[in-house]
């Protein structure tokens, strides 16, 4: 019984045109930076019969899921969502057979729809469908089963599926950001580690503010972050498992360690350790807890970042007189300078796509976020404010998160996409700095 | 595809009619299960952080005032992006060194600071260069280096707020703090 229905369902899933001309492939070009945002309809997700859940009724969840998806797509700068306020809530039958007339009249090019169902075992199932409004083809369907506490992740995963199908790139919405929340006068700043979903939801503090904390960074593979703390007047890097709360100091260095950043496989932590007023780059093996020194110039070598294939490291060094970017092999050999031109260059981060390095370009007193190819060519400045620094890449290597300080001292998180467009604020409850974008969640 | 269109359409309508009855029929081809979210971790709780291996030193405000009176200052300043000691700085540090030699029971913790015009990580290292420069000078003037410790705050603890040359100049500094105890 189930098998033949499933077969029919799968056949139904394959696009077929009956009397409708074949449409050009619906696609958003995210590299040129010139295309107008695609109008996309995202009405509220219907539910069969409204059921109460610990996260609200399924009717309310259906509205909120559509809201999250709209917010994500809008935030990417590539879409112009027409949301729940514009269209009535569809019926459940409309999810598989939408009435495209209303969406065409609103000039939507694509439609995202789906449903919310409360299952007898307490989980929720959220369906997610994407249609080409003009050709009426179904482009994508996925289903997500979540606990009520994790319902927002289904909306983020649906957003990622929509984004991916329409841009040809992987998404970035089901991810988290860790950063430093700041408050108080600049002379006595209180800094706390904080974590939130990339859309600002589920925000919580990870430290109390008792110790100065800086530079949190995600491990790519588990619930661990590295960060730097001044606890007990001993500035050093720590590993913090944010699931269990357990912490462990990294290495047994007598001097200051800082600037920790994980390798793509999560097994190595790169960092800087000071030595007689200089700073060297070390690789710390998380499993064996052994450290290897990779650089040993009489200079400040810091801000190391692995390439996504783990074979090279970009870092910042003043060995040539002032801070510039260098690329070396993962074993520390073969360092070559890659940044030239006006001013200084620092805080480099290799894109997860491997094609670019984001960094802070400093000319005079102005700091701007820039990108450059690993061979040093093609430098492009992306922002133009007073002090923008500390870039971090989205999981798909298309959006850059950074910290902006204004002349009056306010510090906020902002993001900008690779084309230099869509410079927007990431809202946080307090001032914020040192953002790090985590991997796509599994 | 076209020769099978009719039977598929019939089957599809049959499915659509039964959709309300069984949600499983409209479940999409792929599905994904979320793991339950981890419990909120305790913050800075004892038992989650390794035990203290170092006792933080205690400042001594009376002796600090005494040193300032003898040396003229407990702070020396640096030019932009530099950790060199100019004449004024050497004079002050010389006075501190004499005082420290006379008061052999105390230790000193030297803090290094920068202005805000550098990336966070570089400034941590530059602050330590400044603290080290002061420490090395004191040691060269006869203070046992074992009594001196350094710590850099980079640009995290400015002495004055402000985005102007005067504020920046007053933040580029090394501060000698008289302490007792500590490692």
Image: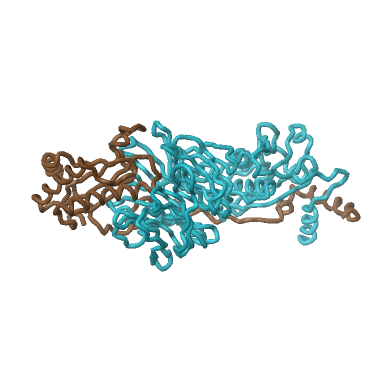
Q: Which chain is cyan?
A: A
- Judging from the image, the colouring scheme is by chain
- In the figure, the shade used to draw chain B is brown
Q: What residue appears at the point 63 percent right and 56 percent down from the top-left corner?
A: B32
Name the one closer to the observer, A279 or A288: A279
Q: Is residue A426 left or right of residue A237?
A: right
Q: Residue A286 appears at what percent x and percent y?
A: 42, 64
- Tell which residue pokes out farthest to the right in this image: B3
Front in this rendered view, residue A147 or A296: A296
Q: Is residue B148 visible?
A: yes
List x then y, in percent, for residue B148.
20, 53
| Residue A48 visible in this rendered orientation of the protein | no
* Left or right of residue B93: residue A286: right
- The location of residue B101, given as percent across then percent down, is 11, 51
Is A28 displayed left or right of A148 in the figure?
right
Residue A282: image quadrant is: bottom left
Quarter of the image with the N terminus of chain B is bottom right
- Residue occupying the point 87% across, 46% down: A18
Number of numbered discs visible in the structure rendering = 0
* Residue A240 drawn above or below residue A133: below
Quarter in which the C terminus of chain B is drawn: bottom left
Residue most extreme to the bottom: A288
Could you tell whether A120 is left or right of A223 in the image? right
Residue A442 location (% of width, % of height): 57, 56
Does A333 sit above or below residue A195?
below
């Amino acid at each position: 019984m189930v098998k033949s229905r499933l077969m029919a369902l799968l056949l139904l899933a394959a696009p077929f045109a009956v009397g409708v001309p074949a449409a050009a492939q619906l696609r958003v070009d995210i590299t040129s930076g010139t295309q107008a945002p695609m109008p996309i309809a995202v009405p509220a997700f219907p539910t069969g019969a409204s059921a109460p859940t610990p996260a609200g009724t399924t009717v309310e969840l259906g509205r909120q899921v559509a809201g999250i998806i709209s917010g994500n797509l809008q935030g990417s700068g590539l879409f112009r969502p027409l949301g729940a306020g514009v269209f009535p809530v569809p019926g459940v039958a409309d999810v598989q057979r939408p009435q495209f007339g209303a969406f065409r009249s609103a000039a939507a090019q694509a439609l995202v729809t789906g449903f919310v169902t409360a299952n007898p075992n307490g989980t929720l199932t959220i369906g997610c469908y994407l249609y080409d409004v003009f050709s009426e083809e179904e482009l994508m369907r996925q289903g997500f089963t979540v606990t009520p506490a994790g319902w927002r992740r289904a909306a983020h995963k649906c957003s990622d599926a929509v984004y991916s199908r329409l841009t040809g790139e992987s998404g970035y919405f089901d991810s988290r950001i860790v950063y430093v929340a700041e408050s108080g006068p600049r002379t006595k700043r209180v800094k706390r580690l904080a974590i939130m979903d990339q859309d600002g939801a589920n925000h919580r503090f990870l430290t109390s503010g008792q110790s100065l904390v800086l530079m949190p960074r995600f491990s790519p593979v588990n619930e661990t972050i590295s960060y730097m703390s001044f606890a007990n007047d001993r500035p050093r890097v720590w590993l913090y498992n944010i699931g269990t709360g357990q912490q462990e100091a990294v290495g047994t260095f007598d001097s200051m360690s800082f600037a920790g950043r994980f390798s793509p496989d999560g097994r190595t932590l790169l960092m800087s350790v000071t030595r007689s007023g200089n700073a060297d780059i070390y690789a710390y093996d998380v499993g064996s807890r052994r450290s290897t020194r990779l650089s040993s110039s009489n200079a400040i070598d810091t801000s190391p970042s692995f390439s996504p294939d783990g074979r090279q490291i970009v870092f910042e060094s003043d060995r040539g007189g002032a801070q510039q970017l260098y690329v070396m092999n993962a074993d520390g050999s073969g360092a070559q300078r890659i940044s030239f031109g006006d001013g200084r260059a620092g805080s480099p981060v290799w894109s997860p796509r491997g094609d670019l390095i984001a960094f802070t370009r400093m000319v005079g007193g102005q700091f701007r976020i820039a990108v450059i190819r690993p061979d040093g060519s093609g430098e492009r400045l992306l922002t133009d404010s007073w002090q923008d620094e500390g870039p971090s890449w989205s999981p798909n290597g298309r959006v850059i998160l950074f910290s902006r300080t204004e002349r009056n001292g306010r510090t906020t998180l902002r993001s900008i996409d690779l084309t230099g467009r869509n410079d927007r604020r990431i809202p946080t409850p307090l001032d914020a700095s040192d953002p790090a974008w985590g991997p796509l969640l599994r | 595809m076209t020769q099978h269109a009719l039977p598929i359409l019939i089957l599809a309508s049959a499915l659509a009619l039964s959709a309300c009855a069984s949600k499983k029929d409209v479940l999409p081809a792929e599905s994904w299960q979320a793991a339950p979210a981890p419990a909120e971790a305790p913050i800075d709780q004892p038992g989650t952080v390794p035990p203290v291996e170092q006792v933080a030193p205690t400042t001594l405000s009376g002796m600090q005032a005494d040193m300032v009176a003898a040396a003229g200052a407990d702070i020396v300043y640096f030019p932009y992006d530099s950790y060199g000691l100019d004449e004024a700085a050497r004079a002050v540090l010389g006075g501190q060194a004499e005082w420290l030699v006379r008061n052999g029971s105390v230790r000193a913790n030297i803090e290094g600071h920068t202005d805000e015009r550098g990336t966070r990580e570089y400034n941590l290292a530059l602050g330590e260069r400044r603290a080290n420069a002061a420490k090395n000078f004191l040691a060269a003037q006869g203070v046992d280096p074992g009594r001196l410790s350094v710590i850099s705050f980079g640009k995290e603890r400015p002495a004055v707020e402000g985005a102007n040359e005067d504020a920046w100049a007053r933040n580029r500094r090394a501060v000698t703090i008289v302490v007792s105890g500590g490692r």
